[in-house]
Amino acid sequence: MFETLSGRLGDVFDRLRKRGSLSEADVTAALREVRVALLEADVALPVVKSFVDKVRNRAVGSEVLRSVTPGQMVVKIVHDQLVEMLGAEASDLDLEVVPPAVIMLVGLQGSGKTTTTAKIGRRLAKRDKKKVMLASLDVQRPAAQEQLAVLGEQAEVNTLPIVKGETPATIAKRAMQAARFGGYDVVLLDTAGRLHIDEALMSELVEVRDISKPAETLLVADSLTGQDAVNIAQQFNDRIGLSGIVLTRVDGDGRGGAALSMRAVTGCPIKLVGVGERLDALEGFHPDRIASRILGMGDVVSLVEKAAESIEQEEAEKLARKMQKGGFDLDDFASQIRQMRKLGGMGGLMGMLPGVGKMKKQLAGANVDDSILVKTEAIISSMTPTERRNAKVIHASRKRRIAAGSGTTVQDVNRVLKQYKDLSVMMKKVNKMGQKGLMRHGLQGLMPR
Amino acid sequence: MTTETKPKGWLGRLRAGLSRSAQSLTGGITGLFTKRRLDDEALEELEELLIAADLGAPTAAKVTAALAKSRYDKEVTPEEIKGFVADEIEKTLAPVAQPLVADPARKPFVVLVVGVNGTGKTTTIGKLARHFRDAGKSVMLAAGDTFRAAAIEQLQVWGERTGAPVIARDTGADAAGLVYDALTQARKEGRDVLLIDTAGRLHNKADLMAELTKVVRVIHKIDDEAPHATLLVLDATTGQNAHRQVEIFREIAGVTGLVVTKLDGTARGGVVVSLAERFGLPIHAVGVGETAEDLRPFEARAFARNLTGLDAEG
Ligand SMILES: Nc1nc2c(ncn2[C@@H]2O[C@H](COP(=O)(O)OP(=O)(O)OP(=O)(O)O)[C@@H](O)[C@H]2O)c(=O)[nH]1
Ligand SMILES: Nc1nc2c(ncn2[C@@H]2O[C@H](COP(=O)(O)OP(=O)(O)OP(=O)(O)O)[C@@H](O)[C@H]2O)c(=O)[nH]1
Ligand SMILES: [Mg+2]
Ligand SMILES: [Mg+2]
């Protein structure tokens, strides 16, 4: 799920990030692409529109465009908005009621209700040690009740005995009685698939709801659903009131738009996802992780957040001005290193950067670790202010003194000086790319080659 | 066509389903174009609306561009736009609207039914059994879904409803073996049509798709021209993922035609348009309900006009 969307948005954001500065027009153009990407990922039009509007309002006119890393900031806003749309926190089933707690599953034909009923039953019985009963109220589909009975056996939970010719309401009453009588903790009610516009069948659900007073009313929906997702979710919610959504077939290669749409129009959390036909193929839903995955960017968000906390903007701007004038000295070098360490050192930084997988290996090979940063800082602090301002004066005897003062070797001092020199060269290149890109390239320039 | 006398009759139900499907698109177009100059903004909005009808971005762009070419900067009415869009869509769909005809020279005419989980394969087999029986053919069903709980029982109910014998083994049995039995049996009995159900499977699961290849191979072994039709059953609520479904099922199972189900809901089924454009596979029929009678031939004009909110027969 979400791979296509992730790819499309990734391209848009790569372009954004590459730019040193952003104009309002850049943001508008990027958001147009975001809109098409979302639509193509099957996110419903009204949801897309409101999403893009919110992002635009926050991105334009705020400090974003003037910030050090405007591209990153826009990406972060999109991310935050995605999280808001998906719901910030993972939410589990809430069964804190006087037992038996009823879970009623509803949805369109073939969405996966019966399978999900058995999956949830199995999980509650196995993981939470609950006494669980399954009951099928599906008198519509051929062999529906037999299907649940077989699945119940596989899940090793009891199912309400089948009595032919009963109405769903009667079965619900019988299930409630049997559950109270048998001291069950949880009763799962599987219902027949129905269209959200089928008035007769929707009132039947209302009746069942009023009889069983469910603790959870879950809409079971196919993650491959297209634009219709909003209609389905909205109408089920309006008509019977949902407490959560279960997305099925997340093991498919769907684009996941339904997840965004349904959550957005109902405000109901996605509580579980089905990831296969087997009864153990049920997982919780973590909106934050999903949002990061959609943006396909490692954990850039935490990186930006951390950077915002730990890099003082003023200092960065001062540095930027200096570099532009070509006045980048060893003091500035030291300050860059300090900032890197604040960001969690090489390891922390690398982990947060997108597409860093293979670079990580190279780094491990080059034996780079944070101790080098510490050493570098020590070496620079053993230099005199004159030396720091003008590295050219550092000759052999000074190198020996600095090495002794910092508890390192002359080779170490040479390495730092070389890095500084490389970085200065790099800075000149960076200046051509624009001042705003400086922080990032500055940090990259520190990486040994 | 006796739509007037029977509200739930032949085309009535299709139209009822489809006009509901068309509601938001139509509302959109009407709202968009009431006495309006066709400018860039209007075109962009139309394009979005088409995407929102599950048409997909490239098709939406194409339809919009065609409209722009003939009407740009002119005053247009909603009716004009609808008519134009419907005509464009109809042009794409007309060549693929082909009913499923069972060649009487084949005995049996073998139909393999495939698709992702829950799209309506088993139900469509029930409907096709009724359709062929009503056409005077003798039909046999093969319960090739040996995986899902009570899938066999489900097909057996359809067998009873339509008077077609069902060849089945136990759940967990080898599907290819069962299909072999069924085809042998159908030949022996001189059946006209053999409808083979298969387990739902996601197209991105290589192992399950390999199983399907095995089923096809077994059928080939007995009759190298069979299956004579391999139908992919698509759920109309499906979004752009339908493209992947068609692509992979066609490649692996040799899909020859489509059936689109659940058009009685609000799903607009617009993805069918871009599927037709891209693959050109025949669309044989549409499902508009859960009973044996709820299968309709696919009609390009009715579908296109209904999609844009015009009277189906106009
Ligand atoms: N791959 C995959 N298949 C699933 C998942 N959940 C359900 N299925 C399959 O989807 C199909 C339909 O599932 P059911 O549980 O029968 O759906 P339902 O909503 O009860 O269907 P009706 O009762 O007819 O409305 C079956 O083939 C299931 O095995 C899932 O998470 N992943
Ligand atoms: N409203 C409506 N429901 C349909 C239609 N076709 C099938 N269904 C329903 O969709 C659900 C799933 O149908 P099945 O025929 O079991 O689907 P399947 O593809 O065989 O499912 P699996 O074998 O589990 O993959 C059932 O509840 C059917 O009654 C249709 O055209 N309209
Ligand atoms: Mg069911
Ligand atoms: Mg089936």
Image: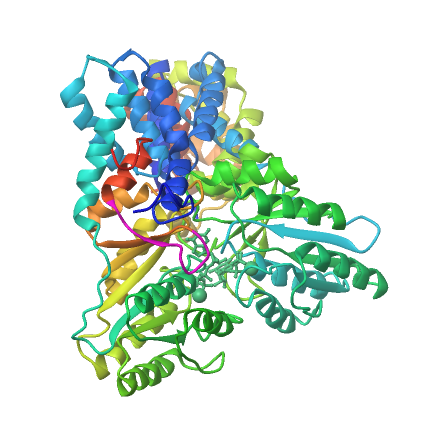
Looking at the picture, does residue A358 appear above or below residue B27? below
Q: Which percent across, then down, holds residue A274?
A: 54, 56
Q: Which percent across, then down, holds residue B100?
A: 24, 60
Residue found at x 32% / y 86% = B185
Q: Does residue B294 belong to the magenta stretch?
A: yes
Residue found at x 43% / y 23% = A69
Q: Which percent across, then down, holds residue B246?
A: 29, 55
Q: Is B13 left or right of A208, judged from the image as shown? A: left
Q: Nearer the viewer, residue A16 or A200?
A: A200
Magenta stretch: give its range. Answer: B289-299
Q: Which percent across, then down, holds residue B16?
A: 40, 40
Disc tally is 0
Residue found at x 35% / y 27% = A16
Q: Is B270 left or right of A101, judged from the image as shown? A: left
Residue found at x 45% / y 69% = B161
Q: Does residue A50 belong to the magenta stretch?
A: no
Q: Is residue B132 visible?
A: yes
Looking at the picture, does residue A185 appear above or below residue B198? above
Ligand 4 sits in which quadrant?
Answer: bottom left
Q: Outermost residue toward the front?
A: B5
Q: On the rendered image, what quadrant is the C terminus of chain B found in?
A: top left
- Majority secondary structure of magenta residues: loop
Q: Is residue A299 visible?
A: no
Q: Outermost residue toward the bottom?
A: B188
Type of colouring: rainbow
Q: Nearer the viewer, residue A64 or B42?
A: B42
Quadrant in the rendering for residue A154:
bottom right
